[in-house]
Image (cartoon, rainbow, N blue to C red):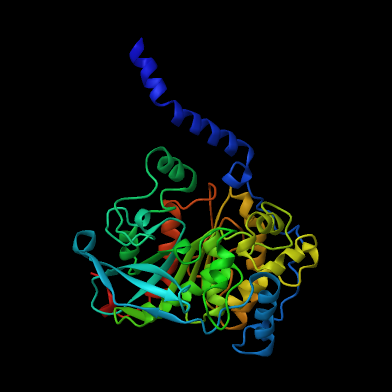
Amino acid sequence: MIRPILWFLARLPLLVLILVVSLIMSSCSMLGMNYASLETTNKAAPEPALDVAAVTVEGSPAREALKQKFEDVLYGPWPAGMPVSFGDWQMIDPEYLDGRGTLEEVAITVGSGESASTFHLVTAFPKASGPVPVVINQTFSSTCSVFPDERATDEDGTFCDGPKITGALGWLETEIFGTYISVAPVGRYFDAGLAYASFYASDFIPDSKKEAPAAMAALGGPVNPTSALMAWAYSFSAATDVLEADPRIDPQEIAVMGHSRHGKSALMAAVWDRRIAAVVAHQSGFAGASLSRSHTGERLDRMAKAYPHWLAPQAQEWLDKLDEIPVDQHELLALVAPTPVLLGNGRRDVWSDPNSSFRAAEAASAAYEVTGHPGLTVSGMQDFDPAAGIAWWLRPGGHSVVSEDIDAFTTFLHDHLVRERPPQYAVH
């Protein structure tokens, strides 16, 4: 009798934690207990109307004016001219994945002076007979959790010694947010013919409404970012600087990828840095691919009040009049064109509002078509065409990164970056 009681008491904290999380999930659509509507024909068309021909011409006054409007209303300035410097690659594992490649890291410094910020880009290079495409993933979790068995550099400058989140918390993280919310399935990217690079976004600018504004203001560039999203978008650009200079990487085939808030910054990076060849924006939600005028799910106003540092300070002026906001996200997607983009979604992720994201993709599709590229080719929210210019992906489940998502990501990236490559680029 005593042994079962002791067993129960030992596991009581975990049981209480599971109960609390279950109660939260039962009442919170953010964590995926409701279903997104699949009906889009009964909704109003996104506004403002697109000047498709004008915004798709690189450098045109209309295109530059629309980018400026996004900076003025939501994101703050692109930090043009912000210094980027980096050191030499440091070997972490010369026989990574049983000899399939190497795992290396490089320190990247953005800004100037004592307050410049340094983060580490960890890259898995496959053994190949020529330069290969790469996808850069901006992660929620520290490098130690993304590469749990490797001695990469942690955010405090020490070497990693296993993942940061373990035990009950680690189990809950993966149960709620998916197996791949932290750890990277690098072998699957190798299988698709890709190198894989990632960095911890908060290692550059902390995801904190108290710390982020000061960190951005102190970077010391000619123009400093005023939103964490724009700063994180610029860190994608800094990582691109490093990888395009490496002869093992094809500089014309660099993709960016992010989930949730980092899906937002991935889309922004593709607009302000046109070197980027493809985008995976998974469940990017508001200020990403979902319409700011939508009143479903989290909504832009809720997001901006909970995470004010994600957007520029002036965005707060529009939160009580979203129906009048002078830009919306179908225009952001149009500015991405003709760069191929995958918009990932979960049917239960009502918080990210997949319905308005699909309508934004429908409206932006014309921007791809006018440049001679296929835009959104599917007829409904449950179809998937990875070869499309706007590849729409909707699976069951909530706000997470799961195995089915990795299949969609790698198929999309392979179709757009790898499929047409000559045989000498094959990964061994």
Along the horizontal axis of the image, is 9 left or right of 291?
left
Along the horizontal axis of the image, is 399 left or right of 37?
left
Quick one: 369 or 227, which is closer to the camera? 227
Please report the residue visible at 50 percent of the width from the left and 65 percent of the height from the top: 205
For the N terminus, the quadrant is top left
Q: Residue furthest top?
A: 1
Can the viewer see residue 160 in this picture?
yes
Residue 76 x, y percent position in the rendering: 64, 74
Quick one: 47 or 239, which is closer to the camera? 239
Q: Quadrant of residue 239?
A: bottom left
Quick one: 288 or 144, which is closer to the camera? 144
| Number of disc labels | 0
Can the viewer see residue 427 in this picture?
no
Identify whether 248 is placed above or below 360: below
Along the horizontal axis of the image, is 240 left or right of 423?
right
Q: Residue furthest bottom?
A: 60
Please report the residue visible at 43 percent of the width from the left and 41 percent of the height from the top: 169
Residue 344 x, y percent position in the rendering: 53, 59
Please report the residue visible at 69 percent of the width from the left and 86 percent of the height from the top: 62
Residue 263 x, y percent position in the rendering: 53, 63
Identify whether 81 is placed above or below 97: below
Q: Quadrant of residue 352?
A: bottom right
For the C terminus, the quadrant is bottom left
Please report the residue visible at 63 percent of the width from the left and 51 percent of the height from the top: 351
Quick one: 275 or 365, which is closer to the camera? 275
Residue 252 x, y percent position in the rendering: 41, 82
Q: Quadrant of residue 354?
A: bottom right
